[in-house]
Structure formats: C-alpha cells, structure tokens
Image (spheres, rainbow, N blue to C red):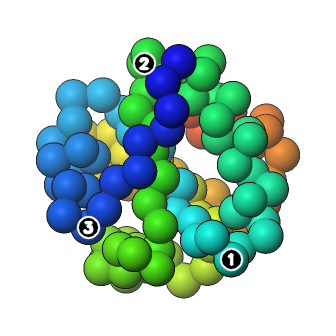
Amino acid sequence: MAEIAEITDQNFEAEILQSDQPAVIDFWAEWCAPCRAIAPIIKELNDEYGDRVKIVKMNVDESPSTPGKYGVRAIPTVLAFRGGQVVEQLQGARPRAAFEEMIKKLL
C-alpha cells in the first residue's frame, strides 16, 4: 500500500470533508514521542485498510488551524470522519486494537 498522505490546513477540506471514503486523520508532531510510538500502527492499518478508508496524517506544528477547529488539545489525537463529520476520536498512545476498532466501525 502507498505511504500515508500528509495533509495540511490548505487541502484538509478537499481530502477529508469532501472525500467519498470514510477517513482517519492522525494529528501528530515530530517532537511527540507517543506520536512516534503509534506511527507504525497507523502505517500497518493503512496497509491493511487503506483501500477502503483514507488514512492520513497532519502535522499540528505546520497546520495549526484544523486541529484548533476540531478541538485537538493534545497529541496524538486520531479522528474518524464519515460524510465530513467527526464520528469518533481517540487521544493518546493506544494499542493497535483501539485504532483498528475505530476503522472497522467506519466500514
């Protein structure tokens, strides 16, 4: 499967809100150790479910507007979107099963 796309404030609406597919967005930053800890899990899930769910990352330091709009106060925060609406949120480093359950609910 392809690498996980990195989205920005500029393309968030087109990539997530207007997407025909459900989407999962991982809000992260380079300096965030828990973000780095879940990165391999997010990549594995992209490899497994990326053909049915759009899985992307957003660097909160480079794109601060969107996280602020969605109330992201701590990272990592992972939001699930369906039809342009947030349907679920996970915060902090979690086991793979928690993220996988979120994705399965979108399918």
Position in image of residue 16 (x %, y %): 27, 46
Q: Is label 2 in a helix, a strand or a loop?
A: loop
Q: Which residue is mark 2?
A: 52
Name the kind of residue labelled 2 in the image: Arg
* Front of the two marks 1 and 2: 1
Does dot 1 land on a helix, a strand or a loop? loop
Could you tell me residue 12's position as x and y percent?
25, 56
Disc nearer the start of the sequence (3/1): 3
The three-letter code of the residue at mark 1 reads Trp
Distance (Cα) linking label 3 and label 2:
23 Å
Q: Position of residue 89 (x, y in %)?
A: 55, 57
Instruction: Indicate the amino acid at tag 3.
Output: Asp
Q: Residue at x 33, y 40 (%)?
A: 82
Pointers 1 and 2 in contact (C-beta within 8 Å) = no
- 28 and 107: which one is in front? 28
Is residue 107 at all visible to an observer of this figure? no
Residue drawn at x 44%, y 60% is 58
- Camera-nearest residue between 36 and 48: 36
Say above or below: 11 vs 83. below
Q: Is residue 102 visible?
A: yes
From the image, tell me which residue sits under label 3.
9
Q: Nearer the viewer, mark 3 or mark 1?
A: 1
Q: CA distance from mark 3 to mark 1?
A: 20 Å
Residue 31 image label: 1
Which residue occupies 26% across, 67% down?
Answer: 9
SS class, disc 3: loop
Q: Are marks 3 and 1 in contact (CB under 8 Å)?
A: no
Examine the rendered structure and indicate whether residue 99 appears above or below residue 11.
above
Give the mark nearer the N terminus: 1 vs 2. Answer: 1
